[in-house]
């Protein structure tokens, strides 16, 4: 299957600082990527859709000024958590969809565990 | 939006047992995927199955789109099968929307 790589896998930052997370599709091009958040023992919730060359679209309740998304190329999307606070601590995971043979299948990165102290 | 319900929420089995995990969804879908989330959080793709039946080794899945449910079967369970199994659906064509996830089934296989 297609490969999506996410970096870093784990980050600890101080409250008030910003953290950037990268998501790359390694063997295919992705005009659209997705960012999810998962709190402990809960399911994944879609945060935003990252569109190459245009603005991201955010789900209801997700602050676009806190979670900045940039999709500058067909293989890279970045999520920046700005002015992070302890309540932003979570597992963030990206996905990209591979199109082919009549199907659109989502593949996920390894995830980033963010801890804000 | 579309609702996805998974059952059971928790399942504890002995090694060697068989299990069936269920996913119900509230509207028509054009994408349905089953994932296994390992202890490190990685989502492993198991099946892309918006309809029909597929098998991969000890795992198989069936989706009956007209009745809005999917089943994941695990046979001869091994301890390495432990983890959380998620069903996720996509509602629109072309992958334009993200997936909606169920709450998962937490499977524990005991030796």
Image (tube, coloured by chain):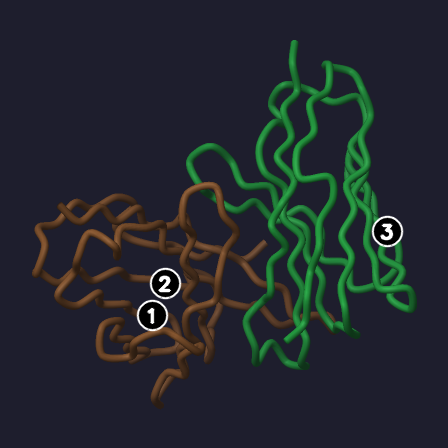
Chain colours: A brown, B green
Q: Residue at x 57, y 81 (%)?
A: B96
Q: What label does residue A110 carry, if any?
A: none
Query: Quick one: SS at disc 3?
Result: strand
Label 1 SS: strand
Q: Residue B85 location in percent, x, y?
A: 63, 42
Query: Residue A23: x and y, percent?
Result: 35, 62
Q: What's the residue at 79%, 74% (across, down)?
A: B28
Distance between the alpha carbons at the discs numbered 1 and 3 = 34 Å
Chain for numbered disc 3: B
| A88 relative to A29, above or below | above
In the rendered image, which residue does mark 1 sit on? Answer: A76
Q: CA distance from mark 3 to mark 2?
A: 31 Å
Give the quarter of the figure containing the N terminus of chain A.
bottom right
Q: Which residue is mark 2?
A: A24
Residue for point 66% across, 33% down? B10
Mark 3, residue position: B62
Local packing at callout 3 (Cα closer than 10 Å; few below 14, some 14-19, many 20+) is some
Identify the residue shown where x is 60% and y is 65%. B100
Mark 1 and mark 3, same subunit?
no
If you read the primary sequence from the N terminus, does the residue marked by circle 2 or circle 1 appear first? 2
Q: Nearer the viewer, residue B18 or A105?
A: B18
Q: Residues within 10 Å of mark 1 (few under 14, many from 20)?
A: many
Q: Position of residue A110 (x, y in %)?
A: 41, 48
B107 relative to A19 in the view: left or right: right
């Amino acid at each position: 299957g297609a490969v999506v790589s996410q970096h870093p896998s784990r980050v600890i930052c101080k409250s008030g600082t910003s953290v950037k997370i990268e998501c790359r599709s390694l063997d295919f091009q992705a005009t659209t990527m997705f960012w999810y958040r998962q709190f402990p023992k809960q399911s994944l919730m879609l945060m935003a859709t990252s569109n190459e060359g245009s603005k991201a679209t955010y789900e209801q309740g997700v602050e676009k000024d806190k979670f900045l998304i940039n999709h500058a190329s067909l293989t890279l999307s970045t999520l920046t958590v700005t002015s992070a606070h302890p309540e932003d601590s979570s597992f963030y995971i990206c996905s990209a969809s591979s199109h082919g043979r009549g199907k659109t299948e989502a593949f996920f990165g390894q995830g980033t565990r963010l801890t804000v102290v | 939006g579309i609702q996805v319900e998974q059952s059971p929420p928790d399942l504890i089995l002995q090694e060697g047992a068989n299990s069936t995990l269920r996913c119900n969804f509230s509207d028509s879908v054009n994408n349905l995927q089953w994932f296994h989330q390992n202890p490190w959080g990685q989502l492993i793709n198991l099946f892309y199955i918006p309809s029909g039946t597929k098998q991969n080794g000890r795992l198989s899945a069936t989706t009956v789109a007209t009745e809005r449910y999917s089943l994941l079967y695990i046979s001869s369970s091994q301890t390495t099968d432990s983890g959380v199994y998620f069903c996720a659906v996509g509602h629109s064509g072309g992958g334009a929307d993200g997936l909606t996830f169920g709450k998962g089934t937490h499977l524990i296989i005991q030796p």
